[in-house]
Image: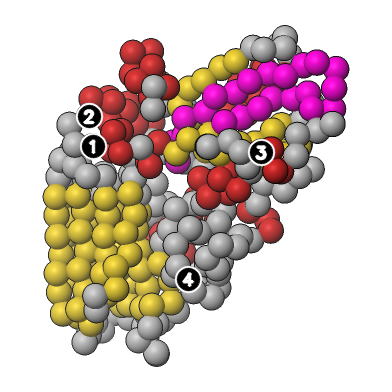
Amino acid sequence: MEIGTAIANCFKCGFVMVREDGTIGAYNDMAKDVTGAVLNFGMGHPEGKICKDDIVIIADNELGNDDGLTLDDLKLLNISDTSIKEGDTLLAVGVYKNDKIQPIYKYGKNYSYGREMRLSVRYLGFSITADVDSGKRNLRISVDGSKYSMNYLVAVGHMVVIDGNTGQVKFFQAKGYGIRGEEIGKLLRGKSYMAKNPGKGRGDMMPTIGRPVAEVLNGKEFLDAVKKLMTGEHGQTTEDLFMLYKRMFYCRLVRIKTGEPSDGVYVFIQDIEMMESIISSGNILIKEIEQINKKAYCLTGVKIVISSVHLSAIRRK
């Protein structure tokens, strides 16, 4: 008998079972939460797209890294400052496709661990703040007291959009935006964003039984590890840090091969961003990952390799 959903939900981390044919045989609710397929907080918004005269707020700890953002995209907010370069920290408020209204922004050169920056403005009648705290690995945007926060390990492009007609927040960035294809650059270039319905997920994002695992957990090194284990013997395991949709996860993969329908690779997933000890200031692992990531951050699916000593520390969590 194949492992069922009730059993899968007993695991205290994200769990996905990959069948021999590479499709998903089981998963638990935490897998949906960890990957960002389902929101675990109360706010939401309908689907839509950024329109002319919408107010766009950006908090980005490393421009051009995880945000899909180019310097040309910033011109859509009337930001044409040639001093801003990829890799800079950027806090900005501007009006989309309106060259009559000047933006307000702040940027910092030479992205580094421990940097803190804040932009606090009164802009077109709204009280807006944007913060980057790279020591705590946190980005925060607030609009008239409503707060939108994101934690990260290496880099995140955080964005909030205010409807230019209604004055209401029509979009905010959230965990899993890579899976949803909602990087800042893509949205500024006209891509629509999905609705956020707390506790629910879009069907095309969900780890549905029978779907190819490559459509749900996209990352070359991860998929290579699954494929390699499929050729191995019962009980073989591998564990490492993998990039899935440009977010880092700690995964333990176990090969089950007993001649039963439950055969396959069992994947246990932990979100590195949610481990407080990993996010904490001064952590050696963060600094090591950061330096490696700066050399290869733009390659989707590239695994971040760390020493076995640090990996053992993660296992103990």
Q: Which image quarter is the N terminus in?
A: top right
Q: Nearer the viewer, residue 76 or 144?
A: 144
Q: Which residue is mark 1?
A: 280
| Residue 192 image position (x, y, % from top left) | 54, 68
Q: CA distance from mark 2 to mark 3?
A: 32 Å
Q: Kindly identify which residue carries mark 3.
A: 8
Sooner in the amino-acid sequence: mark 3 or mark 4: 3
Q: Which residues are magenta?
A: 247-268
In 3D space, how far apart are the residues under numbered discs 3 and 4 (Cα atoms)?
28 Å
The residue shown at (44%, 62%) is 41
Q: Magenta stretch containing residue 253, yes or no?
A: yes
Q: Determine the secondary structure under disc 2.
A: loop
- Is the magenta region chiefly helix, strand or loop? strand
Residue 280 drawn at (x, y percent): 23, 37
Query: In this rendering, is residue 305 above or below 219?
Result: above
Q: Disc 2 residue type? A: Asn
